[in-house]
Image: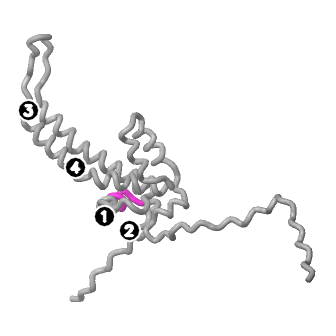
Amino acid sequence: MTTSAPAAPAPSPAPIDKPLYGATFAQAVQRFFAKYAVFSGRASRSEFWWADLFLFLAALVIWVPGMIIGYATGSPYVSPTTGQSSITPGPAFAIFAVIGVLFYLAVLVPGIAVTVRRLHDANFSGALYLLVFVPFGSLILLVLAVLESNPQGARFDADAQPYQPVAAPPAPSTAPPVPPAPPVSP
């Protein structure tokens, strides 16, 4: 019987501190959690959108069964003032609601972080994330997240060189030349 050494894991296609262009779903989700609270650097479009799809699917997995089970085990309710009937969700709904809220709280920070890194990849300041607090700000963020990567966004990387302004050449003088002073005689 021969035993062989276990195969070494395949190297990551890109360093964790650089954006991974063309990331797969699994790579994007792994990087989403690996960079849990990293607001510096950049995230490619594929990293951002695969992570968003993961969050959407996870929410569906939590909330849809919660709604179905919650309302299936609920009790009918008739409003005494309007006479309209509805169903009050059962206790199972509360269990799924607590799980959903805990999941949302767990992914809140990495969700904001990947959005800030996506803004960096498009060469925008992460402070633009604050647009979520103004009307239609989330729509503006959606448009910014769709934009292509901008190579100038590398300024947000950890190993980026600090900005050093280049001195402008002196402007030509528009004043007439000053004639030389006459020689002084003794």
Question: Residue drawn 26% across and 48% down?
Answer: 58
Question: Residue drawn 42% across and 63% down?
Answer: 41
Which stretch appears magenta?
A: 23-29
Question: Quick check: 88 above or below 150?
Answer: above
Q: How far apart are marks 2 and 1 (CA)?
A: 8 Å
Residue 105's label in the rendered image is 4
Question: Quick check: 18 above or below 116?
Answer: below
Residue highlighted by disc 1: 34
Residue highlighted by disc 3: 90
Front residue of 120 and 61: 120
Question: Quick check: 144 above or below 70?
Answer: below
Q: Is residue 47 left or right of residue 184?
A: left
- Determine crowd level at label 4: few under 14, some 14-19, many 20+ residues with C-alpha closer than 10 A: few
Q: How far apart are marks 4 and 1 (CA)?
A: 17 Å
Outermost top residue: 82
Question: Residue drawn 40% across and 54% down?
Answer: 116
- Of the two numbered discs 4 and 2 on the same chain, state the one appearing first in sequence: 2
Q: What residue type is labelled 4?
A: Leu
Q: Nearer the viewer, mark 4 or mark 2?
A: 4
